[in-house]
């Protein structure tokens, strides 16, 4: 996670490059193909694209998107936040989320920060000017959601957010600050919302963990939400037991935070063992529907759980902070109901 104090932010103007006109040779070849009745080349498959002009962007972030071909109207939208020293392309390439966007039919938004915002390219989850509702990076991410839902006709009631490490901590902050925007979230190797307000307190949260009562943690969310009364986002919490970068106790505090917000017990309704040495605990709401789920991955260090392969429940590719264990994106998508 490694937060650092950000330098002052130069504002940038990001512009799309105008497409080059087709060359005369290409036009001739196209004409010959039409005359001979040849089939045209297939349309280029969906890919990661940068989007500019998505709002006032007070957090000086960049917006990237992945939109499957033939995306239906009213499809869900998932926002995915990278960790420190990473970028949108890293998360797109390793996390496995594009596989499920294609399979289940939803759009993806990948916000990206840079070293001009934070020396380690971390989202500034511990800085009130960036994590508070309608300020800084938080507002930039909210503007990306607004832009994407308008652009793609996404269902505003099915918007979700996930992130790794500092991206996971920022996910906590976004869920707390915008419970009216996000139907669900997934915090991967992150910390609870409201854990830190300075760099020094962020380091304490990260390495040692901070112990508070469920009520105190829940109050932090209720305060950040601006008086929101529900419904609250459904939250998945992922944590490796051998994580020496983010203390695993943070997962317990996150569970306490969101079960308290939901007004439910900190005792799980059910537990089971999944692949990769993963223990899943489910905390149901008053209607018997999962409201909070925790996934504890035995022996996993700091990173996002992936499981390369072609199976439906396999995804992603290994790399720095992408660890072969279980496909967290698959289980998160199932928890949110994206597979239905």
Image (cartoon, rainbow, N blue to C red):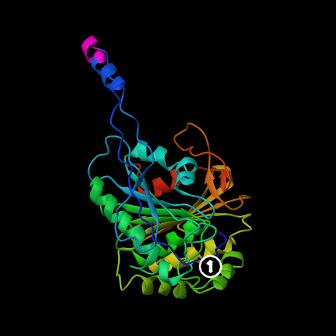
Question: From the viewer's perspective, is residue 249 above or below residue 17?
Answer: below
Q: Is any atom of residue 307 visible in this view?
A: yes
Which residue is at the far top? 36
Question: From the viewer's perspective, is residue 195 above or below residue 232?
Answer: below
- Give the percent coordinates (x, y) of residue 86: 60, 59
Q: Quick check: 209 left or right of 29?
A: right
Q: Quadrant of residue 184?
A: bottom left
Question: From the viewer's perspective, is residue 189 above or below residue 35?
Answer: below
Q: Is any atom of residue 263 visible in this view?
A: no
| Image quarter of the N terminus | bottom right
Q: Quick check: 99 left or right of 300?
A: left
Q: Quadrant of residue 246?
A: bottom right
Q: Quick check: 3 left or right of 57?
A: right
- Give the percent coordinates (x, y) of residue 192: 56, 77
Instruction: Give SS at disc 1.
Output: loop
Q: Nearer the viewer, residue 149 or 223?
A: 149
Is 203 magenta? The answer is: no
Start and end of the magenta stretch? 32-37
**Residue at x-position 67% and y-position 52%:** 323
**Residue at x-position 44% and y-position 83%:** 224
Residue to which mark 1 is pinned: 5
- Give the percent coordinates (x, y) of residue 300: 71, 58
**Residue at x-position 58% and y-position 82%:** 195
- Give the percent coordinates (x, y) of residue 292: 49, 68
Name the magenta segment's main secondary structure: helix
**Residue at x-position 54% and y-position 81%:** 127
Q: Nearer the viewer, residue 105 or 34?
A: 34
């Amino acid at each position: 996670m490694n937060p650092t104090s950000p330098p002052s932010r130069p504002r940038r103007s990001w512009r799309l490059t105008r497409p080059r006109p087709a060359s005369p040779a290409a036009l001739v070849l196209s004409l010959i193909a039409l005359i001979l009745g040849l089939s045209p080349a297939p349309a280029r498959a969906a890919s990661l694209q940068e989007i500019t002009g998505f709002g006032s962007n007070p957090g000086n972030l960049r917006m990237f998107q992945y939109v499957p071909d033939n995306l239906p109207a009213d499809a869900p939208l998932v926002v995915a936040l990278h960790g420190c020293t990473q970028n949108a392309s890293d998360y797109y390439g390793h996390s496995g989320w594009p596989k499920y966007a294609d399979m289940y039919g939803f759009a993806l938004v990948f916000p990206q920060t840079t070293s001009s915002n934070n020396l380690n390219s971390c989202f500034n989850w511990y800085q009130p000017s960036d994590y508070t509702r309608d300020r800084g990076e938080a507002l930039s991410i909210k503007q990306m959601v607004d832009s994407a839902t308008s652009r793609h006709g996404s269902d505003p009631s099915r918007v979700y957010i996930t992130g790794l490490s500092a991206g996971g901590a920022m996910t906590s902050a976004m869920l707390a600050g915008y419970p009216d925007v996000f139907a669900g979230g997934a915090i991967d190797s992150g910390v609870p919302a409201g854990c830190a307000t300075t760099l020094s307190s962020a380091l304490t949260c990260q390495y040692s963990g901070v112990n508070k009562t469920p009520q105190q943690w829940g109050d932090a969310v209720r305060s950040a939400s601006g008086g929101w009364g529900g419904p609250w986002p459904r939250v998945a919490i992922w944590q490796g037991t051998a994580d020496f970068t983010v203390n695993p106790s943070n997962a317990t505090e996150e569970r306490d935070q969101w079960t308290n917000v939901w007004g439910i017990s900190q005792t799980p309704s059910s537990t089971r063992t999944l692949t990769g040495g993963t223990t899943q605990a489910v905390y149901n709401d008053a209607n018997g529907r999962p409201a909070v789920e925790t996934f504890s991955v035995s022996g996993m260090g700091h990173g996002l759980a992936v499981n390369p392969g072609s199976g439906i429940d396999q995804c992603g590719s290994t790399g720095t902070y992408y660890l072969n264990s279980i496909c967290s994106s698959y289980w998160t998508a199932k928890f949110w109901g994206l597979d239905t």
